[in-house]
């Protein structure tokens, strides 16, 4: 296999480089997944299921700073049930894959950077190198916000919501894990929005006037995206996801380059 840094590579040679990059990512993912799979029973209760208890530190912290106005009951407790024979085993596998993807995300970014770097000019490399580093940080920030704010608020609200006192909530394991994984990972991905806007700005594809002009259209698109992200579809969860998306859009407007002055 030829060095990807060499110039004049053919299309098939680029595909070969891409194939090896994907192969390395899969190998690293499999290696990390083995360790996470072994450790998962020890961290599942203390991390994944932590929002099901009133002792969750986020609930206590929000109660302290709001002086009880948010009404996070200390006796809050939800029992997760399983109704399928294979659900616990499949959940063990899927959560291990999700955790492993989050852990190796910096390595995935590194492989992407190594693949596209030979096709960039020096000035593009100068701009995009810090962008890839910043994108990694923003991904972890998004995952943290998803775990610490979006999911706990959503889960607590939906569990406490009562249509009738005759209805007893029994939360299925698959439903809980599906919501947990989706909200945490999706928030990590959407926090890449300012990075994407900045990269496109550096490449001359997007300018500030474009994002400002289509702000109203973007609000509609972000609202639809928030509805897709939130599996419950209730207005409270919808706004809880939409507001960070809109803030990220406004940040994107600030980070992109202004229009170049035109000659009269």
Image: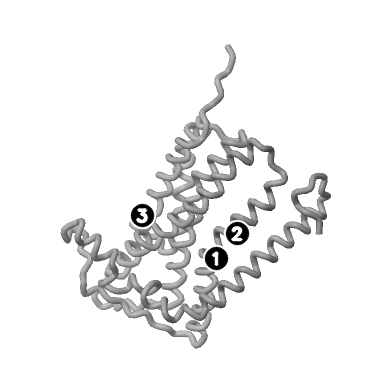
Residue drawn at x 25%, y 73% is 76
User: Residue 60 appears at what percent x and percent y?
Assistant: 23, 65
Image quadrant in which the C terminus is located: top right
User: Residue 195 appears at what percent x and percent y?
Assistant: 52, 45
To which residue does mark 2 refer?
Answer: 108
To which residue does mark 1 refer?
Answer: 101
Nearest to viewer (mark 3 / mark 1): 1
Check disc 2: other Cα within 10 Å, few if <14, some if 14-19, many if 20+.
many
Going by the picture, which residue comes out furthest to the top? 264
Q: Earlier in the sequence, mark 2 or mark 1?
A: 1
Badge 3 element: helix
Image quadrant in which the N terminus is located: bottom right
Dividing the picture into quadrants, the one containing residue 180 is bottom left
Measure the alpha-carbon separation of dots 3 and 2. Answer: 29 Å
Check disc 3: other Cα within 10 Å, few if <14, some if 14-19, many if 20+.
some
User: Residue 93 appears at what percent x and percent y?
Assistant: 54, 77
Reply above or below: 124 against 136. above
Residue drawn at x 43%, y 78% is 173
User: Residue 14 appears at what percent x and percent y?
Assistant: 77, 53
Residue drawn at x 69%, y 38% is 121
Badge 1 element: helix
Is the C-beta separation of discs 2 and 1 under 8 Å? yes
Nearer to the camera, 253 or 78:
253
To which residue does mark 3 refer?
Answer: 240
Measure the alpha-carbon separation of dots 2 and 1. Answer: 9 Å
């Amino acid at each position: 296999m030829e060095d990807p840094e060499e110039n004049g590579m053919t299309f098939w040679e680029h595909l070969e480089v891409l194939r090896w990059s994907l192969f390395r990512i899969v190998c690293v993912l499999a290696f990390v997944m083995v360790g996470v799979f072994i450790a998962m029973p020890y961290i599942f209760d203390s991390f994944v299921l932590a929002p099901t208890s009133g002792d969750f530190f986020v609930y206590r912290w929000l109660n302290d700073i709001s002086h009880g106005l948010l009404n996070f009951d200390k006796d809050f407790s939800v029992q997760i049930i399983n109704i399928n024979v294979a659900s616990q085993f499949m959940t063990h596998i899927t959560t291990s894959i999700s955790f492993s993807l989050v852990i190796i995300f910096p390595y995935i970014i590194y492989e992407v950077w190594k693949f596209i770097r030979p096709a960039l000019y020096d000035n593009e490399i100068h701009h995009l190198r810090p962008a890839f580093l910043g994108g990694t940080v923003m991904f972890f920030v998004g995952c943290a916000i998803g775990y610490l704010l979006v999911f706990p608020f959503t889960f607590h609200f939906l569990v406490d919501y009562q249509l009738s006192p005759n209805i007893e909530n029994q939360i299925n394991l698959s439903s809980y894990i599906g919501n947990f994984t989706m909200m945490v990972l999706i928030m990590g991905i959407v926090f890449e929005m300012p990075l994407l806007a900045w990269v496109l700005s550096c490449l001359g594809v997007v300018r500030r006037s474009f994002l400002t002009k289509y702000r109203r259209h973007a609000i509609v698109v972000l609202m639809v995206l928030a509805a897709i992200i939130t599996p419950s579809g209730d207005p409270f969860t919808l706004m809880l996801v939409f507001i960070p998306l809109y803030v990220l859009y406004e940040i994107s407007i600030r980070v992109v380059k202004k229009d170049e002055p035109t000659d009269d």
